[in-house]
Every structure is written in C-alpha cells, then in structure tokens.
Image (cartoon, grey):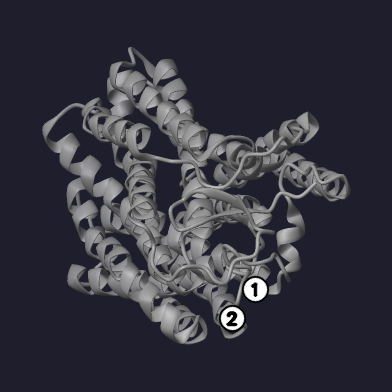
Amino acid sequence: MSTEVSSNASGQPGPVAAPKSAAPEKMSRESVTIIATLLVATFVVILNETIMNVALQRLMVDLRVDAPTVQWLSTGFMLTMAVVIPTTGFILQSLSTRAVFMLAMGLFAGGTALAAVAPGFEILLLARIVQAGGTAIMLPLLMTTILTLVPLAKRGAVMGNVSIAISVAPAMGPTVSGLILEHFTWRFMFVFVLPVALAALAIGAKYLTNVGETEKTKLDFLSVLLTVPAFGGLVYGLSQIGGGRGGQSGPSTVAIAALVIGVASLTVFVLRQLRLQKAEAPLLDLRAFNFRMFTVSVLLMVVAMMALFGGVILLPLYLQEIRGLGSLETGLALLPGGLAMGLRGPFIGRLFDKVGPLPLTVTGSVLMVLALWQFSMLDAGTPVWWIVTLHVGLSFGLALLFTPAFTTGLNPLPPHLYSHGSAIMSTAQQVAGAAGTALLVSIFAVVSAASGLVAGMSAAFLTATVIALAAVVLSAMMRKTEGAAPGHGAGH
C-alpha cells in the first residue's frame, strides 16, 4: 500500500509516482493563503499554551483551590498534548487538510468559549483539555502542509515564519496575560482569544483547500491506548518531580511510579510500532529515524527545548522571587527576547536556504551555552538590563537552532512520512520541555532549600549550560539535506 502523496503548486493533490520535472520555484496564491491561515491559527493556539502561567495565583483565590489543584490547568493541558500529538500522524493521513483544520480549530474555539464561561474549576479544567486537543493537532498539520506545498529551495524561509508561531507566541503569553489581569478578570484571557480563534476558523472554512490525498489506514487501538501511559506517564512524572519549590521532600512515590510506567509503556509502544510497520499500519511511523539528519535534528531540538523551557520557567522565578518584580514587569522583561527570536526567524530561514544548517546551528549552540553560563552568575544585584540582554542573546541562539533543525530534519523524508516526522518532532518537544522544566526546577528547589534562592538559581542554570554543550556537538554534525521534495520520488 503506497501512501506517497504530494501536490502541485496550486495545492491540488496528485500521486508522487507521476513524473514531474521539478518542484515549482514559485508558490501559488492559493498555497500562500493556506499556509498563512495555518500560521495565524498556530500562533493563537500556542499563545494560549503559556497564557495561564501568570494567572494561576489569581485563579487560586477566585476559584478557591490550592496550589497543587490549580497546577492541573497547566499539567492537564500538557498531558493532553503529550497523548494526542503521537496520534496526529494517523489523523493527518486519514482526514483531509480541511477536515483536520476544522477539527483542530473547532476544538480550540469550543474549549476557549467554555473556559470563558466556566462556573468553577472542574469545568475550566475540562475546557483546557478540549483546547489542548485542538492545539496538539495544529503544529503537525502546519508542518506537513508546508512540506507538501513548499518547494525545497524555499522551505527554510517558510519554516522561519513557523518559528514566529513557536517562539514569539510562548514568550508573549505571560506578557499578554499580565496586561489582561492588570485591568480585567481572568475570564478575559479567553474572551480576547475567542474572536481571533473564530475568525481563523471562518477564514479556514472559506479558503482552505485539501492538500495531498487521504487514505484508508486502520487505527490500531492498542497503540492509541498505549500513548496514554507512555507519553502521559512520562510528562506527568517529569512535571511532578519538578513541580515543587519546597525541595526537601524530593520526588514523590507517585511521580516515580508514573515515570516507571511511562518508560515501560513507551518501550511496549515502540515495539508495537516496529511490528505494525511490517503491515504498513503503524500509529507513529518510526522509519523516519532511518534518515540520519532527522535523528540528529530531533536530538538537537530536544536539547534546545530543554534549555528554552528551563529558561522560560527559571527566569520568571528569578525576577519575581529574588528581584521582587510583579507579573506584568516580568512579562515585559522577557518580551524582547521572544520578539528577537521570532522576528529574526524569517531572516534566518532565508539565510538557511543559502548557506545550509552548519554555520547557523554551530553559532546558535555556542550563543546558547554562553548565555546560560552567564545566567548561572546572576545574583540579587544584577542589573535588569543585563538580564534582558542575556535573554535576547539566548533567544537569538535558539532561533539559529530551531529553523535549521526543523527544516534539515524534515527535508529528507519521503511524503508518506511527512505527517509522522512532524508528529515525532512535536512529541519530542513536549517531552523535552517537561523534562527540562522538571530537572531544572528540581535542582533549583533542592539547592535553594539548603543554600538560598541565588545558589539554587545558579545551580539550575549551570546544569542547563552543561546540557547545552550537547547541542554544540550535535550542531557540528548537521549537514544540508537534499530531500524527497514534493513532486520527486521518495528516495533515501
């Protein structure tokens, strides 16, 4: 059973086997509209992912719940993402582009509307889980569509635009929620997002055409069931190990049990996929790892995500607990870095198309190591302007890593692995983000309890620096990939 599909420049599906000379160098207006619609939708759903972090304190008071309970608004969202993303390879192959988009944005808009009117904590948690289901589908949908529609020579530039969605949006989340909470109730975090989500849904319903072909594939229910303890167990265990700031008690029995179950289930899940690959019906096709640059890029992404999420969690802790800044001031201090990362994305993408990944990834990984090392030297008197400067440097380093990692990793895949490669990358991001947060917050908590907050922060950032050294090694292994472009055969 062949699953290789592609499209011509106007987005019309057609089998790859049909001989074509080369992918067109120019994208049609229809293709640009499709990608622009998906980009806006992805930006909105990812912005929503971090918008809650600053609001948890307010929600504890308004909803009369304690800290461990309110944390489930973030943990539940992450768990849903971790479980749904591995299934997106199957979803993207079974449904049309239009149907997948309507499902993703429908879930997101429905969850947002429910959250805005939620009478209590339980309904708000349910709304966040519904939102997360939509969010999980959007990024793999965007990446698969880009791989199908965009000529190989222009993929770097378009993937650079994706970095706006995946890096500016999380950075803006705390700033946006800080501004809203300064003047309105927490409900307005959802009230303001809802019209944008509905507008994206309406635009998509009108203009989105189908990309590629759907195919009849069997859903392996055992694989779907295994994603819950495998990816859910890993993310939950990691989030609970790093969840506390008290530090002395150490990891709980529940967290360790969740991790053990997660690792065991993941092993069974991988073995199951390898077996299903022989029958051409895996839920998540792991043959993407047969492509060396895909494997190197995924590992580089994992290290970069650990550094990014660690920084996103630790810097607000430092600014609020050591420097005494408010939530809005903290959000504004972190905004320049997020903007620097995203706004340089398209430029880095165009540069990538000219020079390839190696010069960009090596520069980016070295910048990341230097910035994290300097963060480990912060004390109670470090000027805020220097912290902002370092954060911009770290963000620029990560921008130099993300676009080349996405593009180099996904380029060599044949079309029938596009959706699976995108799903694997997105899953790796979620698990790496949870792992980075857990590890660094745990170190911060343990050392702080013994030696004070400044020492805890220093130890956590020093650990991040050591992890980031792995990125330097992986960056040096990056090579330009001449992949199975749309319209070409799916050769290795």
Left-right relation of 453 to 54: right
What is the distance, in whole Å, between disc 1 and disc 2 at their CAs? 7 Å
Instruction: Please tell me which residue lies in front, 129 or 449.
Output: 129
The kind of secondary structure element at disc 1 is: helix
Displayed quadrant of residue 205? top left
At label 2, the amino acid type is Met
Quadrant (top left, top right, bottom left, bottom right) of the C terminus: bottom right
Percent position of residue 271, x then y: 85, 48
Crowding at dot 1, Cα within 10 Å, few <14 / some 14-19 / many 20+, comes out as: many
Residue 195's spot in the image, x, y percent?
23, 30
Residue appearing at x 51%, y 68% in the figure: 23
Question: Which residue is under mark 1?
Answer: 293
Q: Position of residue 301 (x, y in %)?
A: 55, 65
Decide which of 468, 439 is in the foreground and name it: 468
Front-lying residue, 7 or 395 = 7
Where in the figure is residue 203, as x and y percent of width and height? 30, 36
Q: Are marks 1 and 2 in contact (CB under 8 Å)?
A: yes
Which of the marked residues, 1 or 2, is nearer the chain's N terminus?
1
Give the side of residue 276 with respect to residue 239, left or right.
right
Residue holding disc 2: 478
120 left or right of 476? left
* Name of the residue lying farthest toward the left: 183
Q: Is residue 12 above or below residue 297?
A: above
Mark 2 burial class by Cα count in 10 Å: few <14, some 14-19, many 20+: many
Q: Nearer the viewer, residue 425 or 231?
A: 425
The residue positioned 58% from the left and 54% from the top of the image is: 6
Decide: is 362 above or below 285: below
For residue 354, say whether it is visible. yes
Q: Is residue 56 visible?
A: no
Residue that sits furthest to the top in the current view: 119
Residue drawn at x 64%, y 57% is: 415
Q: Amino acid at mark 1?
A: Met
